[in-house]
Image (cartoon, rainbow, N blue to C red):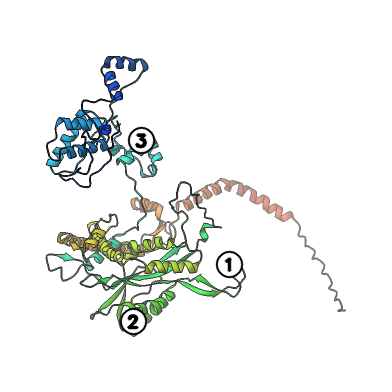
Amino acid sequence: MVLLFDINLTPPQEQDDAGRDLDLDFSPHTPEHAAQLGHVPEEEHQEQEHDAEPEQILEEEQEHGVQRHHKDIPESYKFAAYIALKALGNDRPVVKADKEIVAQLLGISLRSVEKTWKKAIDQEDRNEVLDFSNKRKGRCGRKRRELNLDERVPKVPLNKRGTLRALARSLDVPFSTLQRRLAWGDLRRHTNSLKPYLSLENRLRRLLYCISMIDEPSITDAKLIFKMMGNIMHMDEKWFDMTKRNRTYYLTPEEPDPVRTIHNHNNIGKVMFLTLVARPRFDAQGNMTFDGKVGIWAFVVEDVAKYNSKYQTKGDLMLKNLNVTRDVMREYLCEKVIPAIVEVWPDDGDVGTIWIQQDNARTHVPPDDPIFQAAVKASGLDIRLTFQPPNSPDVNVLDLCFFSSIQSLAFESAPNTLKELIESVEQAYDAYDVNTLAKVYVTLQSVLVQIMKNQGGNTYKIIHMGKDKLIKEGNLPDTLEVDSELYEETLKLIEEYENQLKEEEETKIKVAQAKKTSKRKGRFQLIVDDDTIIAAKEYSTWLKDPSSIIRPSRRVKTKLDLIRETQIGEFEAAIQPRIEEEKPKQEKRKGKQPLIEKEKPKEKKRIKRSKL
């Protein structure tokens, strides 16, 4: 018997007329494909006769060592049974004969078809999505071994759980067990990066920066928000490399592994760039009016090759990295940055003050530099420099995520020379998505909130806001709200930090004054008063009994000097009798010795040699 039926058929939607197109016409006009209840093929008839003797089958299976296992019905079979019953019962209720036909077609038991149909009807009544999956998954099999990882893992030092094998040795657990627990979610992998150390003054400066970024008019209102930051530009420098020592590629199984070679990994080409960005601007209809990309400039200089080599010929122009100093930074600011701002800055009426935020590098130009101020005055704009809090790269959008994106885009071009590297970085900068740059400023505001919650620290996690989804919906906020309680707590914390710094400064002043009054004259010496100097090691003894150490002399000798004097005195007292005995003998010897005049050496005559 041949049955044309696709068990993998999936209906496009669940409707009452689903399955009308399915050909389940079992009328007698197709006798060769008909399925009649009274007709059983020869093979099926033999199977039924074989099933009539279950005891004989069981004995045969026991003799041959065969184990009978219950087979789970695939999900596709259950779905096919549901579609078939839905088609058969389109104009009438489904009866038992219909279920028997479907069970015979699919080769499964009638009970399985009945359970599948009942489950589907119940799910439809509850307006649920049809689900015929097996519920045994995750609920059967051998029970997990109790390892108590929540209690044991935190007790292992961090340096002994840098890898799964090291953690397995520390816990005395098989490596494969920890691999499974990692896949199940009992363990998590964490990549730890070094963060800048923050002093109390650094924390105070970070909190003051966060408060300064809150919109002042909103402080009087019940709803606090951040500033738009439209007039604040972020400037920073970064080294861009041609490639990395370790790269990740995706290959086909038959594709050979790529080979990259270099004479010395320290000779990988790199160029430092100066980057300046601002926040993009959009109109009421969402059209971009300013992309926020002011410019990017490489610190390179063209030089003439002095020697012939395989890379260039003598006299050719070549690019060389420029040694960045304060004079170079001033030159770039006056000749490149300020003209670029004048060229691209949007003229929307009230320009106001334009702030350039930079970090605290020594090469950066101070805000009161006269040459910079003269260049700004000539531009006609009010441009000012400001420093961000020290040890705080997370408050600069370039260090926050912009530079990493540009570097990854530059790697896609695979440059081989400095010129190609500069071109690839500039192309990546121009191709950077404006919406992504707008998202970075929203991320910066969320970072400021986390800094205030962390009391000025940097041990926080950047929250996930789903900004891509908000951009598609057109609901990405320009500014984030600040909790009023968090604002008040931050102000109190700032006052507390300021008081602690004042106490520390007063303590330092007292210590400095004490050092001045003590006037240490030498190593391990301490002045007690104007006429007494004592060794630092003997100071405690002097406090108990000053007469035991102080001598009439102005400077008190150390213990080592006193011991030496004592030993010398004892030695002289011991040999004094012998000295007295030897004195007469020495005098007699001196009297007997005749006075012998030593002959003077003869002077050699100097012979003048004539000059030939």
Residue occupying the point 61% across, 49% down = 579
Q: Would you name the residue on which mark 3 appears? A: 177
Residue that mark 1 sits on = 311
Furthest-front residue in view?
29
Residue 539 showing in the rendered view: yes
Label 3 vs label 1: CA separation? Answer: 55 Å
From what the image shows, is residue 176 above or below residue 269?
A: above
Q: Are marks 3 and 1 in contact (CB under 8 Å)?
A: no
Density class for disc 1 (Cα within 10 Å; few <14, some 14-19, many ≥20) is: few
Disc 1 versus disc 2: distance between alpha carbons? Answer: 42 Å
Quarter of the C terminus within the rendering: bottom right
Residue 587, given in percent of the width and then of the height, sits at: 68, 53
Q: Is residue 430 left or right of residue 36?
A: right
Q: Is residue 325 above or below residue 96?
A: below
The residue closer to the viewer here, 475 or 388, is: 475
Callout 1: SS: loop
Locate the N terminus by quadrant: top left
Q: Secondary structure at mark 2?
A: helix
Residue 391 appears in the rendering: no
Q: Is the C-beta separation of discs 1 and 2 under 8 Å? A: no
Q: Which mark is residue 540?
A: none
Please name whichever residue, 101 or 125, is drawn nearer the observer in this view of the structure: 101
Between residues 225 and 325, which one lies in front from this camera angle?
225
Q: Label 1 sits on what residue type?
A: Tyr
Q: Which mark is residue 376?
A: 2
Residue 59 coordinates in the image, percent (x, y): 31, 14
Mark 2 and mark 3: span between their CA atoms?
66 Å
Q: Disc 1 or 2, which lies upstream in sequence? A: 1
Q: Position of residue 278 (x, y in %)?
A: 30, 71
Q: Amino acid at mark 3?
A: Thr
| The image quarter in which residue 498 lies | bottom left
Image spot of residue 479 (x, y percent) = 21, 66
